[in-house]
Image: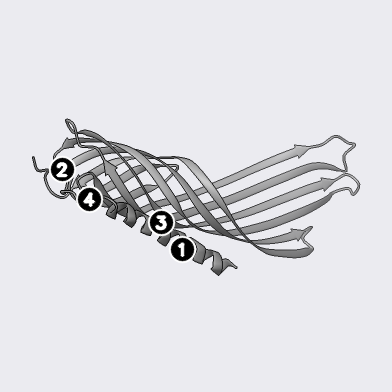
Amino acid sequence: MFETRKHKIFVIGISLIVLMSSLLHASEPDKIVQDRSKALHFFPIYAPAGASLLISHPIKEKAALRWGFDLMAQKSNYGSERDYFYPESYPFRTTFDDNESEMSNYSIDFVTQLIFSSPLDNGLGWYWGLGPVIGIDLRKTERENFRSREYTDYPDSIRVEYDETDQDLIIFNGGMYILIGFEWKFHPQISLEAEYGVLSRYRLRKDTWLTSKDLYSESMYKYESDIEDSSWSFETGHARIGLAFYFHESKK
């Protein structure tokens, strides 16, 4: 079942590339644009998180083919300690909790985009584009929870609970990205670019959980589960700012 869904994502990506090719050949051939040439696009600011590295090649007067990848890497740690004190009516007097979590998230998206642009006017212009996205996300979470309780029904009775959870999440995805952007070419070979985009994609998720529990330092329990599901998502808020470095000086 998991393999079948991966094939679906592959078919979606190929279909979108074929659609882009038909859009290119639907119009009459045009001369190559004179004020834009081959360029390397680097977006160090990419929300929600990450960076992009793309290469564009002009194919018509107002169209270019752009391809590359988006990268994202995140790592975080969280910890807390808490002491609780309870009234005499409770079965225990005090509780001490100690929680530690470590989360890491890595993703890479391969993108191919057809970009349509307006002529530059005093170095200013706008563009829009669309194209397929195929990617993979890898997420790992490790949690440790320690709890000790002092009970009132047994004098000097302290019970300790400890559990550890490891979660491994893999997400395959494929879909269509649509963007609009603005360009300021302040140098013959450098432009400042800002883009905003929306993304609709199909996600295939495989989630593996492994939990170990130690109750009262007497018994050890282990639980393992695998979850597979899929869904469509529509994402807004994809914004990025960066620079375009042109390989050749503009012709005038």
Between residue 252 and residue 159, name the one nearer to us.
252
Q: Earlier in the sequence, mark 3 or mark 2?
A: 3
- What amino acid is found at the position of numbered circle 4 in the picture? Glu
- Mark 3 touching mark 2, by CB under 8 A? no
- Mark 3 touching mark 4, by CB under 8 A? no
Quarter assignment of residue 216: bottom right
Between residue 161 and residue 196, name the one nearer to us.
196
- What amino acid is found at the position of numbered circle 1 in the picture? Val
Residue density around tag 1, few if under 14, some if 14–19, many if 20 or more, within 10 Å: few
- What amino acid is found at the position of numbered circle 2 in the picture? Gln
| Camera-nearest label, 2 or 4 | 4
| Camera-nearest label, 3 or 2 | 3
Residue 79: percent from left, percent from top: 60, 45
Q: Which residue is mark 1?
A: 11
Residue density around tag 2, few if under 14, some if 14–19, many if 20 or more, within 10 Å: some
Distance of label 3 from label 4 (alpha carbons):
21 Å
Distance of label 3 from label 2 (alpha carbons):
32 Å
* Residue 244 in sight from this viewpoint: yes
- Mark 2 touching mark 4, by CB under 8 A? no
Q: Which residue is mark 2?
A: 189
| Camera-nearest label, 1 or 4 | 4
- Mark 1 touching mark 4, by CB under 8 A? no
In the displayed image of the protein, which residue is found farthest to the top? Answer: 122
Q: Is residue 177 above or below residue 191?
A: below
Residue density around tag 4, few if under 14, some if 14–19, many if 20 or more, within 10 Å: few
Quadrant where the N terminus sits is bottom right
Q: Earlier in the sequence, mark 2 or mark 1?
A: 1
Secondary structure, mark 4, is: loop
Q: Earlier in the sequence, mark 3 or mark 1?
A: 1
Residue 45: percent from left, percent from top: 36, 41
Q: Which mark is residue 28?
A: 4
